[in-house]
Amino acid sequence: MKPLLLIVAFALFFSCQPKTETVENVSPEPKKPRTIVTTDGEIDDVDSFIRMLLYANEFRIEGLIYSSSMWHYKGDGKGTLFTSEMEMTRKMYGAKTDLRWPGVEWMNPLLDAYEEIFPKLSQHAEGFPTADYLRSVVRVGNINFEGEMEVDTEGSDFIKAKLLDEDMEPIYLQVWGGTNTIARALKSIEDEYKGTPEWNNIYHKITDKAIIYAILDQDATYRKYIAPNWPDLKIYYNSSQFWCFAYAWKRAVPESQHYLFEGKFMGEEIINNHGPLLKQYYSYGDGQMQAGDDEHIHGDPTRLENAQWGTFGIYDFISEGDSPAYLHLIDVGLDNLNQPQWGGWGGRLVQSPEQPNRWEDGKNVLDFNPFTDTLDATYPQIRWVEAIQEDFAARADWCVMDYVDANHPPVVKAVGATRLSAKPGDKLTLEIQTSDPDGDQLDTKFWVYQEVGSYTGTTELTSSGSKVEVTLDGTSTGQLHVIGEVKDNAAHSMTRYARFVVEVN
């Protein structure tokens, strides 16, 4: 064989050999969290649903379940009168045969509109599910009355099957209405297995994988059934922080940030001229009214002066009180998914000292609010409002723009370890690596999330570009959280983060 041919032969031989990699150098792609949404279909659920569809590539939506609540139920069609178990709605409504029921069709036009914009969305990020797939996981759960959990339904059976499947990845059960359909699924599992040799394994299988994220208690089934019978089931309970995305947002959000919820921003940057899905987003004075809910007067432009929560303008934000349930699932670099006490776009929840499987907000979860100079039970969510709303507007552009014309989030990666040990008086250098898919200029800042950690000493940060020198005082110990925050310089800036956790001892 001639030398040249010999060289070519050897090259072909080695190019065809299987390639190997050192396992230690390969970082497995993190799996997107599994989730099932249960919803009573209130107008703020619809708006939460629309925003969620624009983030549907960030998690695995495995179920979309119609359910009931203290505010919305269908009735049994037999004229049966029902009185709420919840004090507020019992006093407001008394005995009713049905209550403000929006039906079980409202997802359909939203999924049809999502199908229209799917080709555009898919230009901007991988992983958006098809509309046909989302339609395939829609089910009707327990809807006849508030808290009804006596019978199996398609929705409860669907949740039951997911809880019993062999995928042991955590599955987040979002509760946008009542917990009754989830409670029925659990009761059906208990009825089938309790008292059998399999029960212990089944119980622990469910409690190992299921996590409930609830916005308030909107029926009594968690308190009366789930908590006493499934005490090891994890629940993330948001009763305070969601208000900055709910009907009372004007009272919760600092006035200087109201523009992010007012009609000029919501109407021009999100709702109008951004495709058929966002056009269905409910806002004040927009002329829309939800079928079945006679209390949905928000869209009537003649009623803006008499709105329950204040005075509003056309296209002002109404409510998305349930959105924190899935904002918690979006990986923006804050590493909060499995550490809800660390805080993130879904707020900050801490472990209950009385119930170790319950994480909650409230009076014991306060962040310093620089706008009011006070500790505030809502600020753990408010601190992210600007980034969240600007991100929403950027994604609204994805519905109608080609990739080259829209904005995309910067990429932020920690250089080296993100979990570190130090001693009092140490100096640490932390570094992040940043890039932007659109070539935008990036603004980087580092800050200490003081309320999260247990470190109460003084910390001096000296930053230079993508590095920061952290100087600890000479006496304090505890856990210190340093956040690297990176924002791109675009029309609607998008922000991503890296979190460093330093154990000082």
Image: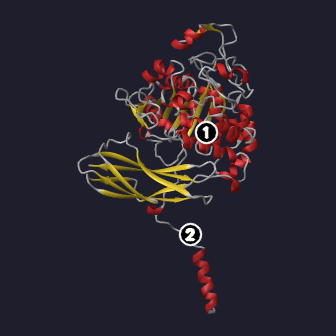
Compare residues 153 and 179 and report the one nearer the observer.
179
Outermost residue, bottom side: 2
Q: What mark, if any, has residue 112 been given in the picture?
A: none
Compare residues 306 and 144 and report the one nearer the observer.
306
Disc tally is 2
In this rendering, does residue 273 appear at all? yes
What residue do we see at 67% from left, 32% from top?
138
**Could you tell me the amino acid type at mark 2?**
Pro
In this rendering, does residue 300 appear at all? no
- Say which residue label 1 marks: 61
**Could you tell me the amino acid type at mark 1?**
Ile
Quadrant housing residue 360: top left
What residue do we see at 51% from left, 18% from top?
220
- Say which residue label 2 marks: 18
Looking at the image, residue 105 sits to the left or right of residue 173; the answer is right
For marks 1 and 2, give the CA distance.
36 Å
Residue 187 against residue 475 in the figure, above or below:
above
Quadrant housing residue 340: top left
Looking at the image, residue 64 sits to the left or right of residue 486; the answer is right
Quadrant housing residue 232: top left
> What secondary structure is marked by label 1?
strand
> What secondary structure is marked by label 2?
loop
Compare residues 340 and 433 and report the one nearer the observer.
433
How many neighbours does mark 2 have within 10 angstroms: few (below 14), some (14-19), or many (20 or more)? few
